């Protein structure tokens, strides 16, 4: 590791031990241009591959090891990042070894970072509405080798409650089994709702036994200068949330 993070990038404000390192990139600091300007890390975009390679190489200078990237599919599969030898189809990972970098790509979905109060383990989950409804948070908490009430969680930037318009299908996905979750939905017009994704994430964390929850205030949709947003722009880049234990 050599370079300091770009000043516009996010260092989570949570009471994790000092050796638990976390970083969330923004649009700033890279070589991508146009709709992808400038620090696009998403290989499944139509950005110039050379720019993505350059951006990822720049990111690597700040990390102890290459990130354990996932092929994210909006599901609930959690993998052990310490033992990965390829890029799996999964939406969350956990690790206990110093130096292993858990990594999530986002552009509206929530990145949720985990550690325990002693900093013995970490986890990262990609939580859009489908993953949340399918239990990606509960599955991640279950894979962490620490008790849920000993965990800390940080909700990174994602689409906010004033911008995330959804249909009845999303409302039903959350409320059929837990009608009280309807408080996270504000009626917009017939068949359409504004969905508070961070509130649903906090609900899922609480149900999984995690009570120390931080973040959840930054909206990707509302800040085009700083954040990529798929819902806002359709053609856009991807940011990364990264977490590791110092070696």
Image (cartoon, rainbow, N blue to C red):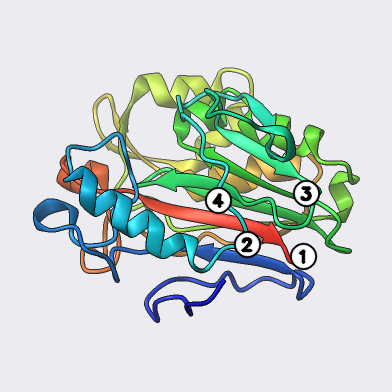
Instruction: Check disc 2 and report the residue beneath it.
Output: 64
- Callout 2: few (<14), some (14-19), or many (20+) C-alpha neighbours within 10 Å? some
Estimate the x, y position of residue 195 in percent, counting from the top left: 40, 41
- Comes first in the chain, label 2 or label 3: 2
Left of 28 or right of it: where is 18? right
Q: Nearer the viewer's eye, disc 2 or disc 3?
A: 2
Instruction: Check disc 4 and report the residue beneath it.
Output: 66
- Quadrant showing the C terminus: bottom right
Q: Quadrant of residue 211?
A: bottom right
- Callout 4: few (<14), some (14-19), or many (20+) C-alpha neighbours within 10 Å? some
| In front of the other: 74 or 29 | 29
Q: CA distance from mark 1 to mark 4?
A: 14 Å
Q: CA distance from mark 3 to mark 4?
A: 29 Å
| In front of the other: 195 or 14 | 14
Estimate the x, y position of residue 164 in percent, counting from the top left: 32, 43
Q: Secondary structure at mark 2?
A: loop
| Residue positioned 57% across, 42% down in the render | 68
Does the residue at mark 2 contact the one at mark 1 (Cβ under 8 Å)?
yes
Instruction: Check disc 3 and report the residue beneath it.
Output: 210
Q: Secondary structure at mark 4?
A: loop
Instruction: Check disc 1 and report the residue beneath it.
Output: 247
Q: Secondary structure at mark 1?
A: loop
Q: CA distance from mark 2 to mark 3?
A: 28 Å
Task: Tell me how many marks there are.
Answer: 4
Does the residue at mark 1 contact the one at mark 4 (Cβ under 8 Å)?
no
- Quadrant showing the N terminus: bottom right
3 lies above or below 58 = below
- Comes first in the chain, label 3 or label 4: 4
Q: Quadrant of residue 49?
A: top left
- Callout 1: few (<14), some (14-19), or many (20+) C-alpha neighbours within 10 Å? few
79 lies above or below 211 = above
């Amino acid at each position: 590791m050599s370079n300091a993070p770009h000043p516009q990038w996010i260092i989570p404000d949570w009471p994790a031990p000092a050796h638990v390192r976390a970083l969330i990139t923004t649009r700033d600091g890279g070589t991508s241009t146009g709709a992808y300007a400038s620090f696009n890390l998403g290989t499944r975009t139509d950005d110039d591959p050379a720019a993505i390679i350059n951006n990822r190489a720049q990111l690597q200078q700040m990390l102890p090891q290459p990130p354990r990237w996932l092929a994210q599919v909006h599901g609930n599969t959690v993998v052990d990042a310490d033992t990965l030898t390829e890029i799996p189809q999964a939406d969350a990972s956990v690790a206990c070894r110093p130096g292993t970098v858990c990594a999530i790509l986002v552009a509206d979905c929530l990145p949720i970072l985990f550690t325990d109060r002693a900093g013995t383990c970490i986890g990262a989950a990609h939580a859009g509405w489908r993953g949340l409804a399918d239990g990606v948070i509960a599955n991640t908490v279950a894979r962490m080798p620490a008790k849920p009430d000993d965990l800390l969680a940080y909700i990174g930037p994602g689409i906010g409650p004033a911008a995330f318009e959804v249909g009845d299908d999303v409302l039903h996905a959350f409320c059929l089994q837990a009608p009280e979750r309807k408080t996270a939905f504000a009626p917009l017009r017939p068949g359409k709702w504004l969905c508070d994704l961070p509130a649903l994430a906090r609900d899922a964390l609480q149900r999984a036994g995690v009570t120390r929850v931080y973040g959840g205030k930054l909206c990707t949709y509302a800040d085009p200068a700083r954040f990529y947003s798929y819902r806002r722009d359709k053609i856009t880049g991807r940011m990364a949330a990264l977490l590791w234990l110092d070696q």
